[in-house]
Structures are given as C-alpha cells and as structure tokens.
Amino acid sequence: MPDSAPGSTNGPANGAANARKPAAPGRRKAARHRGEGQWAAGHFTPLNPNEQVKKDDDGLNVRTRIETIYAHRGFSSIDGQDLRGRMRWWGLYTQRRPGIDGGRTAILEPEELDDEYFMLRVRIDGGRLTTAQLRVIGEISQEFARGTADITDRQNIQYHWIRIEDMPEIWRRLEGVGLSTTEACGDTPRVVLGSPVAGIAEDEIIDGTPAVDEIHRRVVGNKAYSNLPRKFKTAVSGSPLLDVAHEINDVAFVGVVHPELGPGFDVWVGGGLSTNPRIGVRLGAWVPLDEVADVHEGIVGLFRDYGYRRLRTRARIKFLVADWGAERFREVLEREYLLRRLADGPAPERPVAEWRDHIGVHRQRDGRYYVGFAPRVGRVDGGTLAKIADLAEAHGSSRVRTTVEQKMIVLDVPEDRVEALTEGLAALDLTTRPSTFRRGTMACTGIEFCKLAIVETKARATWLIEEMERRLPDFDEPLTINVNGCPNSCARIQIADIGLKGQLVTDADGNQVEGFQVHLGGSLGLEPGFGRKVRGLKVTATGLADYVERVLVRFTEQREPGERFAR
Ligand code: SF4
C-alpha cells in the first residue's frame, strides 16, 4: 500500500475541512441527497473502491513513488491502487495489451487487459504551444513513445508505449519547457480548453487567455481540488465561432457583450457526453474577465462538496445540475462559494461560420495570418511534429495551437510567407484545404491502445476518409463523422452529423464482427441536439463506407433548395 501523505489536504475528511462551510439552508437541502454520497451531506466514508483509493492517498502523491521507486524497480513494482488509480493524476493510463479482441473487453479482468506500457497525456491548456515546446514533444515521441503522438479532441497530445522507467526523464524534458502532465487524467480539473485563436482573431469578442492561465494557476496541482467526484472539464472562449465545444463541458465561459457592462463571459454548467449525454445549461450570469477564475474556483468547490460520489456513473456535475436546475445551482454558488451575487447577462450570438475549426488561411488582427491544417483524425507522429516546428520557424512563427477538432494552427505568419508555409505543410500531408471528410472526421483512440474499446477506430476512420474522398470527390457540405470505439463517446458520438458507436454486430452470415451503432443528426451551436439513434441501424465496419455513401447520395438527390446536411 502507498505511504500515507503527511500534510495532504486531500481525502474526504481533509477535503471537507478545506471546503467553504456550506450555509445551513444548503445543508438541509443536500441532506435529502445523503444517499448520493455528497461530502456536503456528511458522507465522508468512501462508498465505493474509487473513493477509497482517493481517501487512502492523494493521487498527486504518486509522482514521488514513480520517481523514487517504480522508475527504478520497473512495472512489476507498481502498487495496484497506484497502477489503476493514482497514475492518472499524472496523465498515465496503462494501455491495452496487444492482440485482445473487442469481444473480450468486457469479460477480462483489468489486469488481463493491462499492458506494461502506458498512454501518457500532455496537457496543453488553451491549446497553446511554442515551437520550442512542440519540438520537445516531438523528440520525446521519437525517443520514448515509438513515434506516437495523437492530437486529442481536448487540445492535448497523447503518447503511447511509454515505459515507467522513462517517466523521470520525460517530466524533466517537458517541465524544462513549461509543459506538464499534472492532472491530465483522474478525478481532477482537467485541461482548460481555450479558443485556438485567442488573442489574435480579428473577430474576437474577448481574449480569454488570462482566465485560462489564472484557472490553471489556482486549481491544477492544488490538493484542495485533487479529489473531485470525477473528472471536471473546463472551457473558455471569447471567439464568436464558439470554438471550444462549450456545450459539452462541465463548466464553460463563453464570450458575450453585456449591453451595459461590455465584453465578458456567459457561464454554462453541466454539459457532458458519455452514456448519459447532457447539453450544458446557462446560469444566466455575466462574468468579467478578471473574475472568471473566482467563479470557476467556486464551481469546482461546489462540485467537490455537493457532487455525487456513491456511483461513478452519477458522479459528473451534469447529474447535480440536472437535479438542481440552473437557478438553484447559481443560488448555492453565489451564497456559499462566491459570497456575492453575479450580474445577469445575455446569451451568446449565433455563430456565422459553418465550421468552427479555423482550418485554412485567416488574417489576424495585427495583419499577419494564421494557418489551420488538418492531420487525419489527429494522428501525427514525433518526427512530423518536429518538422511542423521547423516549418513554422522558417516562416516567421514561433507559436502553434491545437484545436478541439484534432487539428492544428500555425500563428503569426507574415503575408508573404503564407504560400510557402502552406506548400511546406502540404508536403507533410498536412493540407490547409482538406476535403469535407478529412476536415470533419474525428476518431478516439480505439482498440489499438484503449482498454475499454470494442472496435478499431483511428485506422478505420482514416480508411473511411480515403474511401469517401474517392467515392464522393465533389461532396463539399459541412459534415461531421465521429468514430468511437465504445459507448463512452470520447470522440463525441451524440453531437456529430454521423455519430458511430463501436460495438459488436452480427454480419450477413450470422458472425459477430466489429461494427457501429449509428446516430444521425447531432449538432452543437445555439440549438444543440443529440443525434437520433437510428433504431436497429447498425453497420459492420467493412460496410461503413457503403453506408455513409448511401446516406450522402440520398441526401444529395433528395435535398430541398438551400438544405444543408448539417443541422
Ligand atoms: Fe476508449 Fe471508448 Fe473512449 Fe474510444 S470512446 S477512447 S474506445 S473509452
């Protein structure tokens, strides 16, 4: 068992001591939810194994054991609670042992699925990287991760094939350029999403960068918030394109202009997908830039204290928001955590652009240009990342960004260098003019590395893109196709035009094969909605391109004038 953690403020008892003391009315109401395991209702005894692991020792403390014990003695020396629990607090998950098919995912014990290698997630708050940081990420990929480096749909970079022995050196290099893996996974405040064009876009309502930085400074690695009921996802964007998928974050701050108070942020809470998807709700509150971190910290504290801890399946903030409603949530936030009222404020305007991904060449407010390009389903490699850094620098830039669509952007390119840069990117197969299919397709990690996966995703989505480009070369409607390896929806099944949920299906010969449940017609935006699960519509993996082609051809033939495929 791990050492106890002297001085730790984490674990239910200590964490509760750390909470702002809830006022009496909130306590009385919360008492009705005693059965949900809320700390604010006095439930300090862990009600499930995950809560027990967190109480036994703060996840952040595992870093010391990795550096002083596990990295020297190897994989077999790792404590079981650390291996499948606390490693996540430092961005590490064991990856799936190769060769185990999706049919055995649900029936094997966790240790039978574990490989002796890890996935490692590097958090990139706001998606902001310097070219020096990108080069280091690429070098680590080449030296320690067999060249792997995937851009995730939360602006992070994920490696695979990481050995525990290499972690001290990997951290030394990442932290040497200001990057970290702290709380990249686990029941913690995860990476803070930010507009990839924050601070440069001509049409920006407000630059949220200072708020992203202040949120990070206050909550990441802070033991007051390192034992949350479950993960906690944050997004901040002052772009009118609503470019951080704010609707599906636990908390989001969206740029708006208050008629009297000016530019600030509209607050959303309670969004999230997975198996019980919910679109976030507005609190109806307007927050100025320099108060975003206060409100964020209040909401994280509220989630820590009132969030449900009995069942993992109900431990996201969306369940609390669904039970309380926006009005009560705001009232408790103001009364018990902020100790003041928030100003009422307006909702965001409807975005004008059909795509939110910043692909292509766009003028910045300082007269230079940013250049967005499209790797296939976020899959790059260490060598390519280093070349992107070289190319950007050779064309006058020292900054890049990642997007929530698994894409990238080079910033600050002088006008006379744009064409050469786009040609250089194209030579790396990183086009700035992708087809609809390449632009709009995302995929999660899938069975290649993920222990929960049932089907293959990245390679299959890449194949699908190439098939659709060949079969329908003229299709240029905005379209999103999201390929997921299981029902967990890491690549957002429910909000895609065509959402694909990996599962085993029965083929024409009666065999169980890899396939997908189809969801059609999901969307984000001001009128977001979840795709309809088409009753009984399941496609085999090998029949996927035929199915997508049929749907799009039928749409093209039957469309009304002006009708778009995407809602
Ligand atoms: Fe793994 Fe499922 Fe998430 Fe894909 S959706 S990364 S298979 S947990």
Image: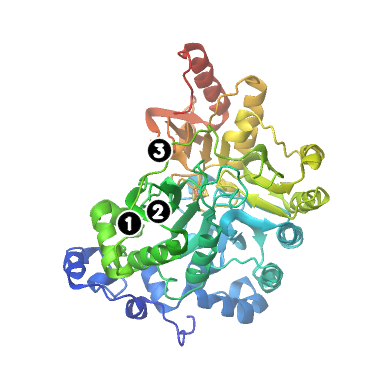
Quadrant containing the C terminus is top left
Classify mark 1: helix, strand or loop. strand
| Marks 1,2: beta carbons within 8 A | yes
Name the amino acid, label 3: Leu
Q: Position of residue 370 (x, y in %)?
A: 68, 44
Q: Is residue 405 left or right of residue 373?
A: left
Classify mark 2: helix, strand or loop. loop
Q: Position of residue 503 (x, y in %)?
A: 46, 39
Residue 80 visible at all: no
Q: Quick one: label 3 or label 1, which is nearer the N terminus?
A: 1
Q: Quick one: label 3 or label 2, which is nearer the N terminus?
A: 2
Residue drawn at point x = 53 percent, y = 33 percent: 353
Residue 216 visible at all: yes
Residue that carries the numbered disc 2 in the rendered image: 261
Residue that carries the numbered disc 3 in the rendered image: 526
Name the amino acid, label 2: Leu
Between 99 and 325, the one nearer to me in the picture: 325
Report the Cα–Cα distance between label 1 and label 2.
9 Å
Name the amino acid, label 1: Ala
Between 522 and 200, the one nearer to me in the picture: 200
Under 8 Å from ligand 1: the CB of mark 1? Answer: no
Q: Quick one: label 1 or label 2, which is nearer the N terminus?
A: 2
Q: Position of residue 525 (x, y in %)?
A: 44, 38
Residue that carries the numbered disc 1 in the rendered image: 343
**Which quadrant of the figure has residue 118?**
bottom right
Between 526 and 232, the one nearer to me in the picture: 526
